[in-house]
Structure formats: structure tokens, C-alpha cells
Amino acid sequence: MARFNSETIERVRDAVDIAEVLAPYTELKRAGQRLQGLCPFHDERSPSFSVNPQDKLYYCFGCGEKGDVFTFLQEKEGLPFGEAVETLAERFGVEVEREREDPRVEEQRKRRARLGEVLDRTAAYYTKYLWESDEAKKAREYLLGRGLSEESLREFGVGFAPNRWDTVVMGGQEGGFSHAELAAAGLVKKGQKGGWMDHFRARIMFPIRDGRGRMQGFGGRATRQEQRAKYVNSPDGELFHKSRLLYGIERARGAIAKKGRAVVVEGYTDVIAAHQAGVEETVAVMGTAITPDQVKLLAAHTGEVVLALDADRAGREAMLRAQVVASGKRVRLRVAAMPEGEDPADMLGGDGPGSTAAERFEGLIDGAVELSVFHVGALLDDADTSSPAKRNRAFDEVVPILHGIHDSIVRGELVESVAEKLDVDSNLIIRRLSESPSVRPGSTASSSSERGPSGETPKSDFLTAQEVRERAFLAMCIAAPSYGQDYVEKLKREHLSTPVMGRVRDWLAGHLDEPTRGLPEDDEEMSLIVNRLAGRAADEPASPEALELSFLQLEKEAIERRIAEAVAVGVSEASVELQKHRARLAEQIAHHQSTGPLNQPARR
């Protein structure tokens, strides 16, 4: 395994300007000999993030995060230590030296560097050809006619591949690169008669880079009617993997960190137009399908992704599939309502920041709705309501999505929309949402500790079966804080039904020993629930076995909701994997039930 010698690491550390590294993530201001700003690791209103520019160290007095420039890249961008060193060395012009490197790893690294070099040379040639050749005149007119400025196009390195068979073949050989290397870089391919030919011809060329700005390949747009494919990408190979790349990520990383969100569009020109208009947190998926690797890449930079894909059927389906792809990645997905037949490049029309078009686009992004809300709307738009049977089928499709919406106000509004569209009583939908296959027959809506003075359950306090189980579980954690603490910390957002329960979980994670002490006055709903849970804690069975069983049941229900979502959007492969997970959980639950007391939290 490759290691950097200590001299190299120190040279990189000495060369780095930590303020420059942190600049995309937080605005730092001088405070004596130190720098101070809002912490990039947690939300806060007053600055508690302190930076020592001399020693290249940071510390947050609010959340306790601390480290050096290498630690920062590891934490914020998910880079291994070696990649963090390499990234900073490249950025600040430090030559690195390695020790005890596996010869095969060294050879692979050198080969990748050589392939990157020929891609860089070719990209520079394509750019020069776009702006200086007569052949590329129509391509220039097309790009500029879309409102993209020459400055923006040059910043993204857009170019043009000549309509000749061997331009890159000959140029690459003259530069000392073999046919095999050119083919590995995705630049040439074998012809039908056995000779070598350029992979791209008569196409507008968009260089595609990774997050560190290293060339990976190209996307080429057709300029002639006889060209069969409108877009052609580099073939998947040693460097280029379309499913793992996002166009523009190398330029968008800083803006994504600063804005706290990423905007995802479909095409190359959409990205350039958005950046030109000041929406610099924009990247493209180079097609309509977002992949797990792309979601993972975005999740390393932000917790919120806005999908601004085309409003046609393909774009809608891509956004719905994203719901399953992003499941478990801790990324909030929202959808911007793009007008039918209008992509971002069309909408922006070359206007810059502050223009009416830019404000309109930013307004759509800011007004993006949760993906689950979009999903319900899409199902209702496509619903066939011509017969009771067809309305019932649509009803069955919508209910699992409503189950996954945690905001009670939003869910209530959608319930009314569904009731109106499908011509059903909204109370029927509410009853259906409260049903769960794991609720024992005869259980009631709420515990006696949650009833009003008259013994009646207030309508506003109606609890679903899932909410009952969540509260029973958390009450057990309060009853036995010594081992309940671990379970509270294991509890994730996907296990909980509403935002307020998420806040309850967060409060208990830090106050389990004395949950009612110092409750915040500005969150009455959360404080009321915590008081109720503390009041019923003494009556809850709180053995380690009961807690484990209860947690497994919550986990199983979370998986079942994800299965329902996968089935609803037609992603069968995701459903199969989730069903395997559910089966394993069912076995664990059965084992606990057979080997210990049945401490199931079904009591209300």
C-alpha cells in the first residue's frame, strides 16, 4: 500500500493556505491571530468555528470537531488520507514522494496519469479547434445562439472534434502515445477494416472531469443530421465511468458546500447556463437516470439535492427512481417544477445573475417540493379514475407514499388532494394510513397517559400505530438509560414517522438521564412528548432484550416502507435486496421472541 514519506506530508502542510481550503465551506473573518466563522460541520447562527492559520488547525467550540487540513478533506469530502494529501499537493504545487509502494500500484498510478495527460492534450486541441477553425463555425453559432457566452464556454473547456478519421490518432502518435493508450483513454477505436480511427468526429466536445478536476473523458454532441446518436460519451474504461461522474462537479463543489445544496440537471449546456446565471451549485447526470454512485458523491458534499430534470415522462420517471436510489444515503431529495418543454438552458437564455430569467430559475429551485410530494402528484396526474376498480388501484399506489411523508401538515394537504381526485372520503385515507400489519388486534389509539382529563383522546393527539411503537421504544430508553443511550443513538430519521419525533430523539440523545430538565420553551410540541414519555417510562419493560426486539421491529417497518416505495416506482431490483434485508430482520425478531419474554411495545 502506498505511503507518503513524512517530508512530503510536511511540505504539503506548509504550502497549504487553510483559509483557502475552507473558503468554499464557510466565510472566515480575522479575530486577533485566529480566523473565525460559522461551523461547516453543524448548523449554527453565531460563529464558534475557530481556525489557527499558522498551525493549519481548526476547532469548533460548538460541536467539538477539530483537525488539520488533511482531516478537513477527509471529513467533508470523504477522501482517504492519501487522496487528501494528493489533492492538496496538486492544488498547491507540491511534488509528492512515496515510500514502500507496491510496484503494481505504482504502475497503475503512472498509467492513469499518462491517460489523463493525453486527455488533457486532446481537450486543449478540441477547444482551440472550436474557436479557430472554419469547420466549427456552425458549432460556435449554435452554442452562442443558446445564450452561452464565449467566456463561460472557455471556462468549461468546450471544444469541437474535426470531421476526420485520424486527427487524434495521428496527433496522439506524434505526442508519443501508443494506439493502446489512446484506446484506453477512450479517444480512438478499431475500424471495421482493422485500422484505428477517432472515437469522436464532427461533435461539440464537453470535457468531463472528476471532483478533483482530473480529466476522465468526453461527451460529444452531434452537429449533423446524419449522425445517428445525438450524444456520444467516452466508452467506460480505466478512467471513464459515466455512472460515477457528474458533469461540472469540479466547478460546483465550492458552491454546493456554501449553498448547502446541489442542483441536478440533465445536460451539459444546462450546467453551463446555470453557472453563467449564478447558480453555481449545478451539476448534470449526463442523461435522465441518477445512480447510487452519483448520489453518494453528492452526499459527500451536501445533505440536500434538488432535481431540476426535464418535465417530460422520462424526466419524471428518473426523479421517481431517485427516491429509491437515494434511500439510506441521508440525502434530502426535492424536485423543482420545471415547465413542460423548457430545460434550464432554454429558460435562462444566456442571462446572467440578477436577471429575470435567473431569478425565475432560482425561484423554481427555492420552491422545490419534497420528492415524496412530487411522487404523489405524479401518481394523481397519471391516475385513471374512469371506474371504481381503477380508482382503487391508484389509491393503493398512493397510500405507501403518503406513509413516508413525515410532515403532518403536508400529508394532510395531500390527503385532501387524493380524496378529491379519487372521489373518496378523506377519513378513509386517514384510517388506511393508521393501519399496520404489525399492530395487534384490539389495540387502541393512544395510552391512558396521553388522554385528556375526560379520558377522551383529543383529535389532534391521534397516534398512528407506528407513532405508538416509537414512543414505547423511547420510553423504554428513558426507563433504562444505561443501555438505552446506545439505542437512542442507533435510531435514525428513517425509523421515525414525524419531524417532531426526530427532535424528540435528538433531545433524548443528549438528555436521557434527565429528559425533562431544561426542556426548550420554543418547542412546546417536543417538550410535551418528552414529558409524556418520561411519565410512562416507569411502566415500560426495559430489559436489553426488550429494547433489542423493539428496535428490530422499528427497523423492519422502516424497510417495509422502503419496499413499498420501491414497488410503487417499479424498481424491482431494489425491492429484492430490501426484501432480503426484511427476511433477515424477521429471523432475528423470531429468534428474540422465541428465546425471551415477549416484551413487544404494543400497549398504548
Image: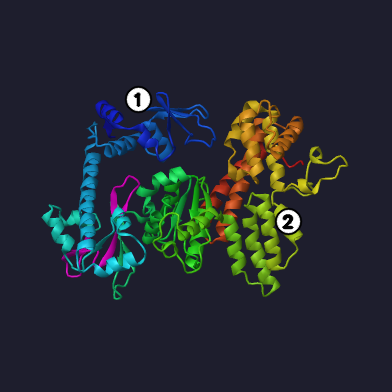
**Which residue shows up at 44% across the image and 58% down it?**
265
Residue 184 vs residue 276, the one in the foreground: 276
Residue 327 vs residue 24, the one in the foreground: 24
Farthest-out residue, front: 355
How far across and how far down the image is residue 17, in percent?
33, 32
How far across and how far down the image is residue 151, in percent?
30, 56
Residue pointed to by mark 1: 54
Quadrant (top left, top right, bottom left, bottom right) of the N terminus? top left
How far across and how far down the image is residue 190, in percent?
20, 64
**Which residue shows up at 82% across the image and 41% down it?**
451
The three-letter amino acid code for the residue at tag 2 is Ile
Regarding residue 237, the answer to whether it shows in the image is no
Judge whether 162 appears above or below 283 on screen: below
Judge whether 32 appears above or below 123 on screen: above
Residue 521 vs residue 415, the one in the foreground: 521
| Bounds of the magenta segment | 187-216
How far across and how far down the image is residue 30, in percent?
42, 29
Residue 209 included in the magenta stretch of the image: yes
Local SS, label 1:
loop
Residue 190 included in the magenta stretch of the image: yes
Q: Which labelled disc corresponds to residue 430?
A: 2
The three-letter amino acid code for the residue at tag 1 is Gln
Question: In this image, 550 relative to 248: left or right?
Answer: right
Residue 162 vs residue 181, the one in the foreground: 162
Question: In this image, 438 relative to 215: left or right?
Answer: right
Quadrant (top left, top right, bottom left, bottom right) of the C terminus? top right
Question: In this image, 301 relative to 93: left or right?
Answer: right
